[in-house]
Each structure stands twice: as C-alpha cells, then as structure tokens.
Image (cartoon, helix red, strand yellow):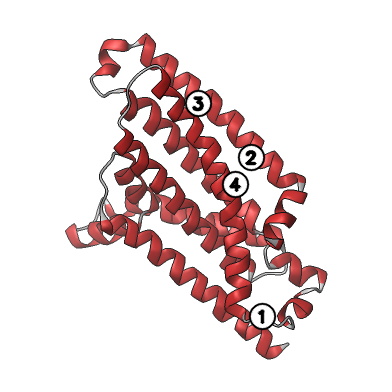
C-alpha cells in the first residue's frame, strides 16, 4: 500500500497512464475505422482478430516502453537518496521488501489494465466479439506486465542511477522482445530455443486466443527468476551495509 501510494503521489504515474490511454484511443479508433472502411476484407478475420488483438498488441508495446520508467526508482532512488540503509534496517525480510514493491507496481499496472480493457469491451455494445480470445489477450498483457516489472525491479537494485536502471531494463526487455529474429537463420533447435525465449511470440500466441500452459509458465518463470535475483541482490546489500 505504501509503494502504491508513493506511486500515485508522483505526477509521472498519472502522466504515463494518461499518455497510454490517449495513444491507445487513437490506435483503437484507427483500427475500428479501417475495419469499417474495408468491411469485406477485414470481416474475414473478424473484429476480434483485427481491432481487439491490434489494440492489445499496441498496448503491449506501450507497456514495454513505459514500465522501465515506472520501475527505475524502486530501489535506485533509495540507494541514491541514502534511504536504502534505513529500508534494509526495517523489521522486514528482504523477500517482504521486494514483494511489497513488486505488488505495489502490479497494483498500478492492474488499474492500467482495467482502463485498457474498457476499449475492446465497448465493442460488445454494438457487435459480438470473441470473449475467450479477449480474455486470453488480457491475460497475456497482464503476464507481460508482470514479467517486465520483475525485470525492472531487479535492474533497479543494481544501480544508484534511475536512468541507468531504466535503460538497462529496456535493453533486456527489448532484446527478449525481438530475440526470435536471431533464430530465423539457424537450425531447428536454435530456432526453437530463441522462439521460446521471445516475449513477443508468447504474447502473440495468447493474443490469437491460443491458451497454452507453455506460454503462461514462461512468464511465471521470468517473474520468479528476476524476483529471486532481486532478493539475492538486496540480501547482499544488507550483508555488506
């Protein structure tokens, strides 16, 4: 609750939320207008595959760009301002500190996700959409938020400079976003490995309505690995402080 309150007291959180909604509103209107203009051609794919999936895919890109800015201050600001020692001396375990900050950011992301959901759901007032595919797409977007937030939290424990943490987070996430491209020229095994590591491939699978435990496990593993790395890093800081 403390981390979420701190986040909403910052104008940055409100600005990012407003910008994402504004940009997605333009994207949503453009996709819907194109669907109506090219009715016959687009109707073969359906409004869910074109407008809903397209909106959520662009939302994923915006999350990729904005999440590093939101997570960069989690621990970097504490270290730069000198309050990290006070934080580590609190009667809380390192795991509680990490999970507290992580869940605080995820609560903000959940609010953002609910606002994003209103756009595709509004189509239900005038037409029928595939609710199963919409649910899969929203699950994929939420899991993407969870994974990127975990990466950002870990990177914020490595540097005293929030800007460095943000740049490092974006670099890692962007690499994982496009890593499947590197496997297009290799053999089948290399292609399979790079495809599995790709954030985009798993996200697209869920956007298309194909729910698979493989995709969900991939995101959960990312969250667990980077949270454990964050806990390990903070434990080392507590030991040497």
Q: CA distance from mark 2 to mark 3?
A: 15 Å
* Helix, strand or loop at mark 3: helix
Foreground: 117 or 32? 117
Q: Quadrant of residue 54?
A: top left
Residue position for label 2: 17
Number of the front mark, 2 or 1: 1
User: Which is in the foreground here, disc 3 or disc 1?
Assistant: 1
Residue 61 placement (x, y as % from top left): 49, 42
Whether label 2 touches label 1, CB < 8 Å: no
Instruction: Say if mark 2 contacts mark 4, CB within 8 Å.
Output: no
- In the image, farthest residue toward the left: 188
Percent x, y of residue 72: 66, 59
**Residue at the (49%, 52%) spot, across then down:** 145
Q: Residue at x 32, y 48 (%)?
A: 201
What residue is disc 1 on?
92
Q: Mark 3 or mark 4, which has the lower sequence index?
A: 3
Image x and y of residue 225, in percent: 44, 71
Instruction: Specify whether residue 219 is in view.
Output: yes
Q: Residues within 10 Å of mark 4 (few under 14, many from 20)?
A: some
Instruction: Kindly report which numbered mark, 4 or 1, lies closer to the viewer in this rendering.
Output: 1
Q: Which mark is residue 66?
A: 4
Marks 2 and 4, Cα distance to the nearest angstrom?
Answer: 9 Å
The mark closer to the camera, 2 or 3, is: 2
């Amino acid at each position: 609750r403390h981390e979420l309150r701190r986040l909403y007291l910052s104008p940055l959180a409100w600005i990012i939320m407003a910008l994402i909604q504004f940009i997605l509103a333009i994207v949503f209107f453009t996709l819907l207008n194109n669907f109506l203009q090219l009715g016959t051609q687009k109707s073969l794919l359906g409004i869910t595959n074109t407008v809903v999936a397209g909106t959520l895919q662009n939302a994923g890109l915006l999350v990729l760009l904005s999440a590093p800015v939101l997570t960069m201050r989690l621990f970097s600001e504490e270290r730069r301002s000198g309050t990290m020692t006070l934080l580590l001396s609190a009667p809380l375990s390192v795991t509680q500190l990490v999970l507290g900050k992580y869940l605080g950011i995820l609560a903000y992301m959940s609010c953002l996700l609910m606002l994003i959901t209103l756009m595709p759901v509004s189509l239900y007032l005038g037409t029928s959409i595939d609710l199963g595919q919409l649910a899969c797409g929203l699950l994929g977007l939420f899991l993407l938020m969870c994974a990127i937030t975990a990466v950002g939290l870990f990177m914020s424990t490595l540097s005293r400079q929030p800007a460095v943490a943000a740049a490092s987070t974006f670099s890692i996430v962007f690499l994982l976003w496009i890593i499947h491209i590197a496997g297009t020229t290799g053999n089948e095994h290399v292609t399979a490995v790079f495809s599995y590591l790709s954030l985009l491939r798993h996200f697209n699978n869920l956007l298309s309505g194909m729910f698979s435990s493989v995709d969900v496990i991939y995101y959960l593993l990312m969250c667990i690995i980077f949270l454990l790395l964050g806990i390990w890093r903070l434990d080392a800081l507590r030991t040497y402080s």
